[in-house]
Image (spheres, rainbow, N blue to C red):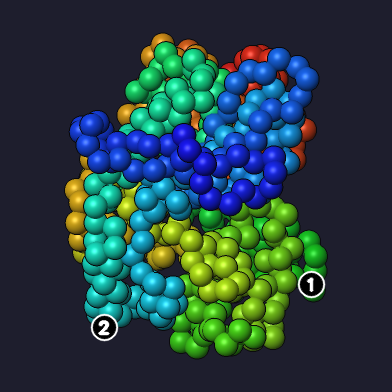
Amino acid sequence: MQGTGEKPGSEWECATLKAPLDYAKPSGETIDLAMIRAKATGSGKRIGSLVFNFGGPGGSGVSSLPGFATAYDTLRSRYDLVSFDPRGVGESAGVRCRTDAEIDASDAVDSTPDDDAEIKTAMADAKAFIEGCEKRSGKVLAHVDTVSAARDMDLMRQVLGDDKLSYFGISYGTELGGVYAHLYPKRVGRAVLDAVVDPTEDPEQGSYGQAKGFQLALDNYLKDCAKKGTACPTGGDPAAGTARIAAFLKELDKKPLPTASGRKLTQDGALGGIAAALYDKESWKYLTLGLQEAMQLGKGNMLLVMADSMSGRDENGHYSNINPANAAINCVDDKQRYTVADVKAQLPRFRKASPVFGEYLAWGMLGCTGWPVDGTTDTPDVSAEGSAPILVVGNTGDPATPYEGARKMVRELGKGVGVEVTYKGQGHGAYNSGNACMTKTVNAYLLDGKVPAGGTTCR
C-alpha cells in the first residue's frame, strides 16, 4: 500500500492497493484501488478491520465513509473503519463515458419515450453513451465485475493483516458480500448485509421489484403527507396522490419547469428527485416542500437539487462517475440483453406496479443493450456453505431493495449461514435508521459476536 490523495481529516489514512486488472492473468497489468481508513479509538481489545461497501454499484467508499463515519462511532471502538472505491469506481480506474457538459445535454433526452421518434432519440443517446465508455474506459470494462471486486476484498483482507474479513455491506454491497462469502466461505468473519439485493432475480425481475418497492414507499409517504391536511401538495387522499403526481410528471414531459440555476426540471429530473427523497424518511419533509414548490408555484429548484444528489452532480456542475460505473458493473455482471420489443411487452405490467416509477424502470432494462462486453452470469452465486453466520437485514419499507430480497439471500447463502433480521420501518437500509433495537442487535453481533435468533424483528 502506498499513500495517495488528499485526506478528509487528520484521523483518516488514504492509500492505494495494487490488484491485477485481470485475475486470469495475475502477473499481468495492474490497477490501483483507492482505500481509506480510520483506526479504532477505543481502549478495549481491537477486533480488526471492518470493511464497508455502501452500494450502487458505483458508490465511492472513499468519499462515503468519512461522511457516514459518526454513525459507526460505536463500532470504531474496536474496529478500524475501512472502505474503498471498487474497481471501475471513483479513483479505482473509474469508468468515464461523457464530459460534464455532455451529461447535462443528455438530460433533454426522454428516458420514458412516448413514440417512435422519441424511442429513436433515446436509443441514439444510449449508443453515444456506450461509445463514450468504450473510448474513455474500454480497457477496464471487461474487468469491473463483482467477482473481481470480491477478489480485491480478499487482497485487502490480507494487506490489512486480518485472518478473516469483517464486513458491512449495504444495498449492492450485500451482493458483493454474498459473492465474497461464496468464493471464500472460510474467510468470513463477522459480516452484516443491510438493504439486501435479491440474488435470485434477473434484471427484469429486479426492475419490476423496484417498481413495486418505490411505489410502496411513495404510498407510505402519501399516507403520512395526507395527515398534514392543506399543507400536503398531493391532497388528503393517498390513493389520489399517486394519480396527481403521475399527471404532474406528464405535464413536465411537455413543459419542464424553470429553476434559479437556469437549468430546467424535466420529467426525468422530477422523478429522480422524488425517488431520492424516498431513500430516507427524514427526507419526506423535503419532498413535501419540493412538490409544493413545483406543483403549486411552478418552480423546480428543490426537486432538481434532490435529483442531482441521485445523479452525482455537485453544485459546480461536476459529476461523479456513479452512473457510468453502475452501468459498467451491471453490464459485465448480467448476461441478459433486452430489446425495445421486450420493454413494450412489459410496460403494462410495470405501469400497474407503479403509475409513477413503472415506465422509467421498464425502459431502464435497455441499459446494457449494445454494451461492448458480454455479461458473465444470469444471477450471482452466493451459496456459502461453511461460512460463519452472516446477519441479513431487511427493511419492510425499503424502496430500492424490497424486503423480500432478505429472505431470498438467507435461503441462497445456505443452511446455518444467513440469519434474518427484520426492521419494520421506512427508507433504504435499517442500521442507520436510528432504530435503537436495530443498532443494539447489529452492534452486539459485530462487537461481541452475539448472533441474534433468526427472525428477530425490530420496530
Residue 433 lies, with reference to residue 243, above or below; the image says: above
Residue 325 placement: quadrant:
bottom left
Instruction: Report the number of discs.
Output: 2
Q: Quarter holding the C terminus?
A: top right
Closer-to-camera residue (447/417): 447
Q: Secondary structure at mark 2?
A: helix
Q: Nearer the viewer, mark 2 or mark 1?
A: 2
User: Which residue lies under the disc numbered 1?
Assistant: 231
Which circle marks residue 326 in the picture?
none
Camera sees residue 172: no
Q: Position of residue 54 (x, y in %)?
A: 54, 43
User: Which residue lies under the disc numbered 2?
Assistant: 117
Q: Amino acid at mark 2?
A: Ala
Q: Position of residue 65 (x, y in %)?
A: 61, 44
Closer-to-camera residue (108/407): 108
Q: Position of residue 328 (x, y in %)?
A: 32, 53
Left or right: 188, with 304 as reference point: left
Residue 104 placement: quadrant:
bottom left
Q: Amino acid at mark 1?
A: Ala
Left or right: 41, with 270 as reference point: right
Q: Separation of disc 2 and disc 1 at Cα? A: 40 Å
Q: Position of residue 218 (x, y in %)?
A: 60, 58
State the residue at coordinates (78%, 61%): 227
Number of other residues with Cα within 10 Å of mark 2, as a class: few under 14, some 14 to 19, many 20 or more: few
State the residue at coordinates (69%, 79%): 293
